[in-house]
Image (tube, rainbow, N blue to C red):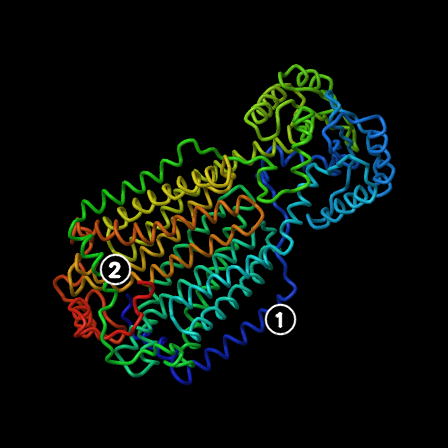
Amino acid sequence: MPNTRTSAGFADRLTSRRGAWISLLLALLAIVGVFGVLSGASAPSGNDAAPPASESAAVTAALAEFDEGTKQALLLVASRDDGAVLTEADLAAVGALAPLLDEQTGYTASRPFASEDGLAAVMQTSIMPGADNAETAETVGVLRDIVAEHPVDGVTVLVTGGPAFGADIVGAFAGADFTLLLVTIGIVALLLIFTYRSPILWIVPLVVIAIADRMASLVTSTVGTALELQFDAGIVSVLVFGAGTNYALLLISRYREELGRTADHRAALASAWRHTAPAILASNLTVVLSLATLVFAVIPGTRGLGVSSAIGLLIALAFGLLVLPPVLAVCGRGIFWPLVPKPGQQRVQGAKWRALASRVVARPVVSIVAAGALLAIMATGLIGTSVGLSQSEKFRVASESAAGLVVLGEHFPAGEAQPMVVIANTGATAEVVAAAQDIDGVLRVTAVGESRDGALTRIVVTGEPAPSTPESLALVDELRATLHAIDGADALVGGAVATDVDAREGNQRDLLVIAPLVLLVSFIVLLLLLRSLVAPILLMLVNLISALAAIGAGAWLSRMLFGQEALDLQVPLLSFLFLVALGIDYTIFLVHRARAEAAALGTKQGMVAAVAGTGGVITSAGIVLAAVFAALGVLPLVTLGQIGLIVGLGVVVDTFVVRTIIVPALFSLLGDRIWWPGRVPGAGTGAADADSDADGEADAEAVAAAARLGGAESNHVTPRADALT
């Protein structure tokens, strides 16, 4: 850790009697200023699934050249409640809805036509999409109200299609972000109360983090709107709460430990800040830099999430290191009531963690084999895992659009719901139509209009396979290959199914590009922090295996418990990023402490002391982070629930298996060689060369480290310093 007069002076000023109040005043002015200027900011809308440079996106852009080219189709699917064949009277009653719909939309709805089995009928109309999803949802809602106000006796009429799905997503999220915030705050509050056993202390970090989350929301919304980014605000909020709570736990845990050594709570807080700030800064920058790699993603939502989350975590860092310490300084030692730390209280720190670590380092091979077997078993869940959900499978809750699609697929060719759209040069229209009709799996090809200048023609191709099935994706590829080969046609294939094809290719490309960059960023941070080559390589390898194991176990649980046969497209990449980047957090917390302890105790016993000193706080932080990510399950989209499940499970495994067993066993097995080619901490020049207080009190720190290993007689820490042991 840094040993400079600058860091010592800053910590002292930040926590001094006068400096704490000045710091809080400056923080308050900054908060009020940001809240006042950005109070009207809202997260940008948009959720493009495919890359902007994809063929399907090009088709969407080309439709602007057509009169009414941006209009979108809505389907009304009718079926009898008793499962009987629709009568002529039923069809006439459904058809009577057309004039009412036409009056609202300005377009002419088709007459209802029955399926071959006569058990269902479908009627098509069109709407002009709004400026955003919410406005489109209002239009769909009005049409659904018309249908509800004119019921057909014994017949259920469902409104489905692309715009209807968008409306259902908006409706499902109505109030969901607020629910997520309440659940997240409740989880953090309960865990902080359990950790600190104080009716007062938990309030301070929770309030600070909540303010940081609100500021992050305003800033990311403003930046997102300015840069036209797309991202999920719920994930950003979860990251801010999770990371902010982790920083608070690390700082307050060390603060409580220092209070057991000194009567001056401000000096104790300054010492705690100096000891924890480097680890907090390193862990934050690791995650931020990992998220920054998402700027190379081609999927808009993935790229936007990287920028917004990085901003949110930097704000969480600022509040954790610059706002929380002066608040604690002003509150004083009494904030720990009723278990107020006092100098001279004697208790072995982390006795259970020390005992566990001692057993692990005594039998490192057995520990590695046992823990590795567990990770291997978890990783087998990857076998048989597929990626890609259909539109109806993306909802965690029932929706009218999904129900309508199910009825449509049962009685009509499933491809009717989402036909493909082809844009081609008008002179080649006949050749394009003929070529498309000759492809197996194509039911119908219709030229439906020309662009305003007559240069382009829009052609609708209806396929037989159900949307998002392997057969439908293969049909898109075959259609593209066939039409691209027609000279002079310049044909482009788009539509919902083609967008799905492009989205799958884009997400696969992002995974192959971003995942190595995330590993590289994490490796470089560990390399600089530990000044070693062996340790970062081994730690990154373990982290990679742990991440794959968590994804495998999460995919298996999704199939077995929730009936989700596949992971959504963005889940593998985002889960991998969060698991690796957040897992490195705990590696940094543990190994940074182990390097400091090794200066006086040697590598093996230094790791034992590090596990004893950080086991409680890492466990607390891991449980908080896992629980906060699990809160994503309250949101209605399967994508977010799967990310929450996988990351939450991975953090728990990382906390209890990787950090507690595998990492200590590796350090025991290799000993001082773990630091190669760097110098063994404390070797040759003593502990002062490796780690000391910023005041230069290296000898005192070495003595204290030895005392912590020795037992209760010389260990001055407060009760519950090993939280959650």
Query: Is residue 6 placed above or below 432 in the rendered structure?
Result: below
Which residue occupies 15% across, 68% down?
710
The secondary element bearing badge 1 is classed as: helix
Residue farthest to the bottom, as pictured: 18
Is residue 564 in sight in this rendering? yes
Q: Where residue 720 sits in the image (x, y, percent)?
A: 31, 70
Residue 240 versus residue 517: which sits nearer the camera? 240
In the drawing, does residue 704 fall left or right of residue 578? left
Q: Quadrant of residue 17?
A: bottom left
Q: Which residue is mark 1?
A: 36
Which residue occupies 55% across, 60% down?
181
Q: Answer few, some or many: residues within 10 Å of disc 2's Cα (few below 14, many 20 plus, some between 14 and 19).
A: many
In the drawing, does residue 417 fall left or right of residue 204? right
Q: Answer few, some or many: residues within 10 Å of disc 1's Cα (few below 14, many 20 plus, some between 14 and 19).
A: few
Is residue 677 in sight in this rendering? no
Quadrant containing the C terminus in the rendered view: bottom left
Query: Is residue 116 placed above or below 687 in the rendered structure?
Result: above
The secondary element bearing badge 2 is classed as: helix
Residue 360 versus residue 236: which sits nearer the camera? 360
Q: Where residue 517 sits in the image (x, y, percent)?
A: 40, 45
Quadrant containing the N terminus in the rendered view: bottom left
Mark 2 or 1: the one toward you: 2
Residue 394 versus residue 307: which sits nearer the camera? 394
**Label 1 near label 2: C-beta < 8 Å?**
no
Which residue occupies 33% across, 63% down?
724
Query: Is residue 587 placed above or below 380 in the rendered structure?
Result: below
Q: Where residue 414 sits in the image (x, y, percent)?
A: 65, 26
Q: Which residue is mark 2?
A: 611
Give, as a three-letter code, the residue at label 1.
Answer: Gly
Q: Where residue 592 sits in the image (x, y, percent)?
A: 28, 60
Q: Quadrant of residue 47?
A: top right
